[in-house]
């Protein structure tokens, strides 16, 4: 009897320890469901944008297995996955790395081709996929000379592109790592490709972001606009959300940190939800989706530990997109030091969270 009581008492103590050790963050979180399993030709998904016809265009740079060239896929409103367009390879590297993408006012699709994993030189590009009657018909270079072309977003006749690293050699020896956001008018590359000056010297660089995290030395990343025309940019390595405001003439008047710290450790892809007045942040480090309101308050929407994503769990989120009352999550699963995600493995997945109406 004495032994039994001792065992029961020990079990009770262990239960208490487990309960106390369980993070409070787990309370009230949304549990993602499996949205879609992707084929081998989509082994590293990255960016998403919603096309005018309601289809989602998904970019897959396939850094994990470049046996499969970078490609653009399409997800129909009925969640059918189809090939959208095969991008041309870079003539110097023989590869293509489609990441951020968005449709311009001319109806064409603009795609960041990130070449930083192929060369240390400024070979990244902004590609223009020509679209006629809702279908891609060709592709050419619109802008070149980026170091790490990343996010792409249009507002009016201007395209905004984040260049996540600006130093010539990476990693640099400085105490902080510069990056920038470019703004370019559509007319500047309408007739021929525009070449940028390197290392952030180009006048199209309207705002700079500095990262102090030497382990994750990527800076300016995701981009999104709110209803008032303020631009938000994620600082990937430092987990900061920048707010950039403009005057009536489009001149930058402020570049401040709206949100930082707390549960948010990384700002990758961003999406402003005008219905809920929040910015959804892809926190690649924490395997989490954070919500930031326009006052800078941070709330964790969904989070989980290291996983293969087979059950729909987050597997290194890099991009989010709201379609109706669904938050669709891209699981890049492209691990490097400092992330919760520790290895790349099948399946390749997208997740989804049902949002409150």
Image: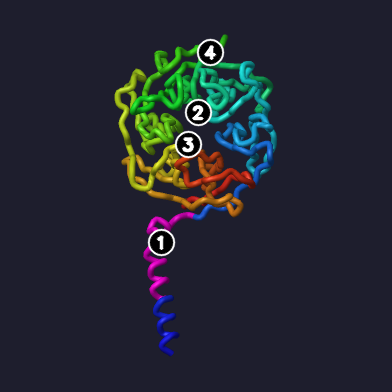
Secondary structure under tag 4 reads helix
Secondary structure under tag 1 reads loop
Q: Which numbered circle lies on residue 269?
A: 3
Q: State the scheme by which the image is colored.
A: rainbow
Report x, y in % for residue 286: 44, 46
According to the picture, the residue beneath numbered tag 2 turns out to be: 150
Secondary structure under tag 3 reads loop
Q: CA distance from mark 4 to mark 3?
A: 26 Å
Q: Nearer the viewer, mark 4 or mark 3?
A: 3
Please tell me which of labels 3 and 1 falls first in the chain: 1
Q: Which numbered circle lies on residue 22?
A: 1
Q: Nearer the viewer, mark 4 or mark 2?
A: 2
Q: CA distance from mark 4 to mark 1?
A: 54 Å
Q: Residues within 10 Å of mark 2 (few under 14, many from 20)?
A: many
Report x, y in % for residue 64: 61, 36
| Magenta stretch in the rendered image | 12-30
Q: CA distance from mark 3 to mark 1?
A: 28 Å
Q: Which numbered circle lies on residue 189?
A: 4
Q: Residue at x 38, y 59 (%)?
A: 24
Which of 156/116 is in front? 116
Q: Nearer the viewer, mark 1 or mark 2?
A: 1
Q: Nearer the viewer, mark 4 or mark 1?
A: 1
Q: Mark yes or no: residue 110 visible.
A: no
């Amino acid at each position: 009897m004495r032994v039994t009581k001792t065992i029961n008492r020990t079990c009770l103590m262990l239960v208490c320890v487990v309960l106390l050790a369980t993070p409070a963050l787990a309370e009230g979180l949304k549990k993602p469901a499996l949205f879609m399993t992707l084929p081998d030709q989509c082994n590293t998904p990255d960016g998403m944008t919603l096309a005018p016809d309601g289809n989602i265009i998904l970019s897959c740079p396939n850094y994990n297995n470049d046996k499969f060239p970078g490609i653009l896929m399409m997800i129909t409103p009925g969640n059918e996955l189809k090939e959208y367009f095969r991008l041309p390879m870079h003539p110097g590297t023989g590869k293509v790395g489609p990441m951020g993408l968005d449709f311009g006012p001319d109806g064409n699709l603009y795609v960041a081709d990130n070449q930083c994993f192929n060369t240390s030189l400024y070979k990244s590009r902004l590609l223009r996929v020509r679209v006629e009657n809702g279908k891609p018909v060709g592709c050419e270079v619109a802008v070149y000379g980026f170091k790490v072309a990343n996010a792409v977003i249009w507002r009016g006749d201007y395209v905004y592109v984040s260049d996540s690293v600006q130093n010539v050699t990476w990693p640099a020896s400085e105490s902080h790592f510069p990056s920038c956001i470019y703004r370019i008018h559509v007319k500047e590359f309408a007739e021929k490709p525009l070449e940028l000056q390197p290392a952030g010297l180009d006048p199209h660089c309207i705002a700079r972001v500095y990262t102090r995290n030497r382990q994750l030395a990527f800076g300016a990343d995701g981009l999104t606009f709110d209803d008032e025309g303020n631009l938000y940019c994620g600082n990937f390595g430092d987990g900061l959300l920048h707010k950039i405001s403009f005057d009536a003439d489009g001149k930058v008047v402020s570049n401040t940190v709206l949100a930082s710290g707390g549960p948010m450790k990384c700002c990758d892809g961003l999406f402003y939800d005008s219905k809920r007045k929040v910015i959804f942040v892809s926190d690649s480090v924490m395997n989490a989706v954070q919500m930031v309101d326009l006052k800078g308050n941070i709330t964790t929407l969904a989070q989980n530990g290291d996983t293969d994503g087979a059950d729909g769990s987050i597997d290194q989120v890099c991009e989010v997109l709201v379609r109706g009352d669904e938050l669709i999550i891209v699981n890049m699963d492209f691990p490097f030091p400092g992330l919760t995600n520790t290895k790349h493995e099948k399946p390749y997945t997208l997740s989804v969270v049902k949002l409150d109406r």
